[in-house]
Image: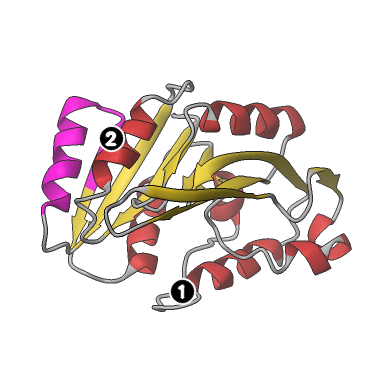
């Protein structure tokens, strides 16, 4: 069983896939799987993902007709075997030590959720980086008991699922999946997650995700 499953929904992302694939290949934690769900792309996305899977057994490609990002993420969750799940959009990328640092915290603290900082990178039309600024989690540290009830004012509004790592057994225990909607599916998933009262929330201020 891999320690981490990366979940990547893919739709017409051929320009960005080489960058995110490279950021996964160079992870300092090597015990992972990366599940790419090609959601009916009309470009070369499927070919790029298939080549990555051919070259590295840790990469897996699922091809499906276009059903939207929620459907793609659900397909990956149905396949995932990792102890933890990291949701990653294919036009984003992560720092090399992302998985290692998150797993170290999660296993030490027995956390159901680990949140971490993000770089917001701004590019021009030529894909040249213009500016990058850091966004930290709403809380940093370790919070136990009923952290979402105690700190709902801060945690409840942080609804994006990127920048977070979830314990997969918690998701499976409550059969958590994304509602099949085109907008707001990640927020609804997150609400469904915290309404089941995860007992340990951990957050790192260090930025690891490039958005």
Q: Name the dominant secondary structure of the magenta segment.
A: helix
Q: Which residue is mark 2?
A: 59
Mark 2: give few (<14), some (14-19) or many (20+) Cα within 10 Å. Answer: many
Colour scheme in use:
secondary structure
Position of residue 96 relative to residue 200, above or below, is above
- Residue 50 counted in the magenta span: yes
Please provide percent x and percent y for residue 124.
Answer: 35, 57
> Where residue 187 appears, x then y in whole percent?
57, 70
Task: Identify which residue is drawn at 85% across, 61% down.
Answer: 151
The residue range painted magenta reads 44-61
Q: Is residue 164 visible?
A: no
> Quick one: quadrant of the N terminus?
top left
In the displayed structure image, the side of residue 191 where residue 21 appears, left or right:
left
Q: Position of residue 68 (x, y in %)?
A: 31, 70
**Residue at 11% across / 58% down in the picture?**
43
Vertical relation: 131 (above or below) 207:
below
In the structure shown, which secondary structural element does the residue marked by tag 1 occupy? loop
């Amino acid at each position: 069983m891999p320690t981490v499953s990366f979940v990547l929904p893919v739709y017409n992302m051929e320009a960005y896939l080489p960058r995110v694939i490279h950021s996964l290949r160079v992870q300092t934690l090597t015990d992972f799987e990366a599940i790419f769900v090609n959601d009916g792309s009309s470009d070369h996305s499927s070919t790029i993902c298939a080549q990555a899977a051919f070259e590295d057994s840790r990469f897996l490609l699922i091809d499906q007709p276009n059903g939207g990002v929620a459907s793609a993420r659900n397909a990956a969750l149905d396949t995932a075997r990792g102890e933890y799940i990291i949701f990653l959009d294919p036009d984003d990328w992560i720092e090399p030590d992302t998985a290692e640092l998150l797993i170290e915290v999660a296993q030490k603290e027995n956390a159901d959720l680990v949140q971490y900082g993000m770089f917001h990178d701004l590019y021009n039309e030529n894909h040249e980086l213009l500016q990058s600024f850091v966004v930290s989690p709403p809380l940093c540290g370790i919070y136990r008991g009923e952290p979402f009830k105690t700190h709902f004012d801060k945690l409840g509004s942080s609804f994006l699922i990127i920048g977070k790592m979830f314990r997969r057994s918690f998701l499976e225990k409550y059969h958590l999946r994304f509602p099949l909607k085109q907008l707001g599916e990640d927020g609804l998933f997150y609400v469904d997650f915290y309404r089941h009262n995860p007992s340990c929330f951990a957050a790192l201020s260090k930025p690891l995700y490039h958005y």
